[in-house]
Image (cartoon, rainbow, N blue to C red):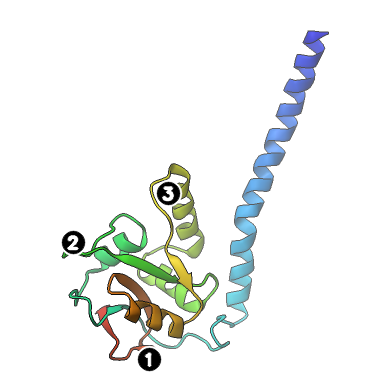
Amino acid sequence: MTGKIDQAVGLLLRLVLPIALLVMVLVAVLPAFAQSAFAADGRTGNDNASLNDDIVVIVSSLNSVKTLTRDHVEDIFLGRMQQFPNEQRAVPIDQAEGLAVREHFNMEMLGRTSAQVRAHWSRILFTGRGRPPRSVASNEDMLHAVAADTHAIGYIERRFVDDSVVVVFE
């Protein structure tokens, strides 16, 4: 009787495990597919305007950091570095998922698709080595969040820059 139970469990595992893996892959891929369809429709999620401006990396005007290299920006936004070069704590802030400005930042500044960035942060979360940056809903929200926190670093379309922030990378 035990042999039949072992065979049944083995058969069940051989059938259930591939199906569970397929479901996990679909759950991971479908949001990226939906976002690419959203972006292909020409909508950005940010006042339904198309992205026609340069993306710049900003810090508060009260921050002593005035310039950063692409490597610094990449390291901070991918969680490999938690400090600015002057050893002041760096707190990255992302734009909301699905916004054209975030898609553009990920590709141009980080050299990765949004799906690749999500996968990167999933690995970091799984290993307990960090948490992804919090996100804000718009360029205006990013401007206010970064201006209010001397440790914050974010990115916006150049046309939203004002005296409350400093462009540290363009």
State left or right for residue 157 relative to residue 49.
left
Residue holding disc 1: 159
Above or below residue 107? Residue 142 is below
- State the residue in front, 47 or 129: 129
Q: Residue 124 carries which label?
A: 3
- State the residue in front, 162 or 48: 162
Q: Is mark 2 on a helix, strand or loop?
A: loop
Q: Where is residue 27 in the image (x, y as percent from the top left)?
A: 65, 53
State left or right for residue 72 relative to residue 111.
left
The residues bearing labels 2 and 1 have C-alpha atoms spaced at a distance of 30 Å
In front of the other: label 2 or label 1? 2
Residue holding disc 2: 87
Which residue type carries mark 3?
Ile
The residues bearing labels 2 and 3 have C-alpha atoms spaced at a distance of 22 Å
Q: Which residue is drawn at 69% across and 40% down?
A: 20
Which residue type carries mark 1?
Arg
Taking the view exactly as shown, the residue that stands out farthest to the front is: 148
Q: Where is residue 131 in the image (x, y as percent from the top left)?
A: 43, 55
**Quadrant where the C terminus lies?**
bottom left
Residue 170 visible at all: no
Above or below residue 9? Residue 79 is below
Judge the density around disc 1: few (<14), some (14-19), many (≥20) Cα neighbours within 10 Å: few
Task: Tell me if label 2 and label 3 are in contact, CB under 8 Å.
Answer: no
Q: Residue at x 62, y 64 (%)?
A: 33
Q: Residue 84 carries which label?
A: none
